[in-house]
Amino acid sequence: MIKIMRVAVVAGSGLLVGLSAGPAWAQPKELPAQIVTLGGSAELHKKGAAAWAPAGLRAELDEGDSVRTQVGGRITLKTASGQALRLGSRSQLAILPAEVETGPTRVRLDNGWLWVAVSPNSPPPTQIEVRAGPGVVAVRGAGVGLRRGADGGVLVQVHHGSAVCAGPNQQWERTLTGPQELLIPASGTPGAPGALTVDKLEATWVKWNADQDLAGGYGGAKPAP
């Protein structure tokens, strides 16, 4: 009888361990991200594929996949928790492998315009990290625009919320709180963050994203008309 009780206790302990481990094991993955809006022409390059192919709504991107837009193209990706990656005209983005299992979604901006919208108070595993040229931008609950120029430099603009920019091997670090911007040169160390400015040529892009952020619950203020 004593032996039976001991077996039951051990079995019960194993059950408790299994139950406690269940929720952690069942945590949803942020990837694949899904294309939820598509305007103009865009293409996908799936990991291991020989060539680019036309992109379509509800197509999914996972680690190792890339997406690019043509002239006038615009695309929005959403992760499982609803964080948004919006790519502007003539821009290209790649999904990178995770460095740690519980780390943020990692992407690389190869060229063009990218807007990242992360909901306020989002836990770290659902946040987004962007590698763009010489910088790494960790986007927390924020609306952040990035533009990678032909010279390899990157302009980071935090419209609302905050983001942390860092250089290779953490050689430098800058924290931006909206509305602020930082120009990361192709080589060398950037200066201090400055007041955010909007180029007239990008005003429409910025207003569209600000409207999307406000409507989607990502934060921000109603943009000026």
Image (cartoon, rainbow, N blue to C red):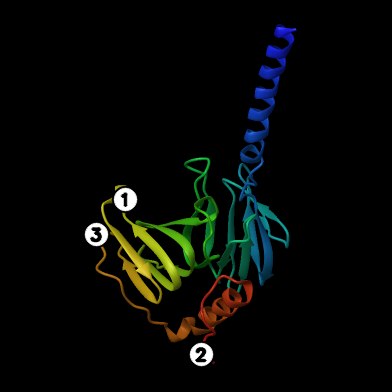
Q: What is the distance, in whole Å, between disc 3 and disc 2 at their CAs?
A: 35 Å
- Residue 132 position in % (x across, y down): 42, 58
Rendered position, 200 above or below 90: below
Write down the residue under mark 1: 168
What's the residue type where badge 3 is placed? Gly
Work out how far the residue at label 1 is from the one at label 3, CA to CA, in angstroms: 10 Å
Residue position marked by numbered label 2 in the rendering: 224
Residue 173 appears in the rendering: yes
Sequence-earlier tag: 2 or 1: 1
**Of labels 1 and 3, the one closer to you:** 1
The residue that appears at 37% across and 60% down in the rendered structure is 164
* Quarter containing the N terminus: top right
Q: Is mark 2 on a helix, strand or loop?
A: loop
Quadrant hosting residue 176: bottom left
Q: Determine which residue is flagged by label 3.
A: 188
Nearest the eye: 68 or 97? 97
Identify the residue at image location x=68%, y=18%: 9
Q: Where is residue 119 drawn, in percent x and y? A: 55, 65
Tag 3 and tag 2, C-beta contact below 8 Å: no
In the image, is residue 9 above or below residue 77?
above
Give residue 152's position: percent from left, percent from top: 36, 62
Relative vertical location of residue 23 with respect to residue 1 in this rendering, above or below:
below
Q: What residue type is labelled 2?
A: Ala
Amino acid carrying mark 1 in the image:
Pro
Q: In this view, does 3 lie to the left or right of 153?
A: right
Give the mark, 3 or 2, whose residue is nearer the N terminus.
3
State which mark lies toward you, 2 or 1. 2
Are the residues flagged by discs 1 and 3 in contact, CB closer than 8 Å? Answer: no
Q: Where is residue 76 in the image (x, y as percent from the top left)?
A: 62, 66
